[in-house]
Image (cartoon, grey):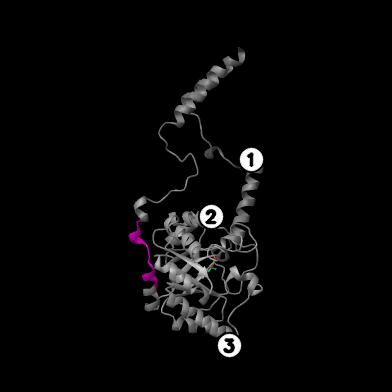
Amino acid sequence: MAGILGHVSGCIRTFLSGVALENTMSVTQLRARGALSPASRLTSDALLQKKRAGQPITALTAYDYPTARLLDEAGIDLILVGDSLGMVVLGYENTLPVTLDEMLHHTRAVARGLHRSFLVADMPYGSYHSSLDDALRNAIRFIKEAGAQAVKIEGGASRAELVKRLTAAEVPVVAHIGLTPQSVHSMGGYRVQGRSLDAIDRLSADAVALEDAGAIAIVLEGIPRELAATITDHSGVPTIGIGAGPDCDGQILVFHDLFNLTFGPPAKFSRQYGDGATFFADALQQYREDVTAHRFPSDAESYHLPREVQLAVASTLPRARKA
Ligand code: KIV
């Protein structure tokens, strides 16, 4: 019996190591290496030209290789590896626990998928809050090790010195003001910012200070449309809005909000472009039912012995049984 099995498995080995006419594993087809040449990538200057030409900048978050490729191939200008990954991908309650290593890991995955889009990585909470030296060291890792073209930091005029320091070290910085999720505790929750005269003055001054310090763009989150329009008008660098109305130079949303993949009702400012949750739930039910009912895999989805091995097995098995 052992001899027969040995013969059959030998044939299978020969068969499998022969010419591979089919995929024997689920492998993502990677792009040719040349496709990732830096020459094809958008730059911060290209984003600035869009602002000047009045062409809206399109931006979305991504956290992994396939999503990055889909966004890049769809022509999205700016891709942010946001620390929102903590909530939408890693299952944390807020963005505060996200670590530098997690951000670097996901930024590398996204960078591998990009051909054209401008790649920005969020610096997570704690990675730029203790000292300018630490912040610089951490920011450089995003550029040097993870392939980001810029980092994003949250905060207003109090971050101007940091923006100057990073910019001087060739680390382009996207600033982020208004509703800054890393300040959830000091803001007392996720609240629309900039509704009082004082707050309007403060946020307007923040935008000026950050631009003066060298920020290449400013994310405006969760502020009244009117304030976002004024900041955008007075800003020499692009503003990218999320919950800041239609008058910003660009718009960004969290990928999972676009596709109903957050297990909750959408925020007022976001729009669903597809129902991923229903799509996946239906497909998963179908898969479960097919396996349970022996409908998957079919014969066509199975590998087969070569004809001569089938014949050898058929002719040897009965003899083996007799012996
Ligand atoms: O982390 C994130 O996704 C962001 C965007 C919402 C701007 O900061």
The spot of residue 286 in percent (x, y) is 62, 50
Question: Label 2 is placed on what type of residue?
Answer: Asp
Q: Quadrant of ligand 1?
A: bottom right
Compared to residue 44, the image places residue 247 above or below, namely below
Q: Furthest-top residue in view?
A: 323
Quadrant of the image for the C terminus? top right
Q: Position of residue 275 (x, y in %)?
A: 58, 63
Amino acid type of the residue that numbered disc 3 sits on in the rendered structure: Leu
Q: Magenta segment, which residues?
A: 37-47
Is 321 rendered above or below residue 60?
Answer: above
Helix or strand or loop: what does disc 1 sit on? loop
Residue 42 located within the stretch drawn in magenta:
yes
Q: Disc 1 marks which amino acid?
A: His
**Residue tagged by mark 3?**
197
Provide the residue designation for mark 1: 294
Q: Nearer the viewer, residue 116 or 148?
A: 148
Task: Give the alpha-carbon distance from disc 2 to disc 3, as whole Å.
Answer: 40 Å
Sequence-earlier tag: 1 or 3: 3
Contact between labelled residues 1 and 2, with CB atoms less than 8 Å apart? no
Query: Quadrant of residue 43 in the image?
Result: bottom left
Residue 303, can we see it? yes
Q: Marks 1/3: CA distance?
A: 67 Å
Does 107 sit left or right of 272 as displayed?
A: left
Which mark's residue is nearer the viewer, 2 or 1? 2
Is 299 part of what is drawn in magenta? no
* Residue identifier under label 2: 101
Judging from the image, what secondary structure is the residue with disc 3 in? helix
Q: Dot 2: within a 10 Å radius of its alpha carbon, few (fewer than 14), some, or many (20 or more) residues?
A: few
Secondary structure beneath disc 2? helix
Across and down, in percent, residue 134 comes to 50, 62
Question: Total of numbered circles in the picture?
Answer: 3
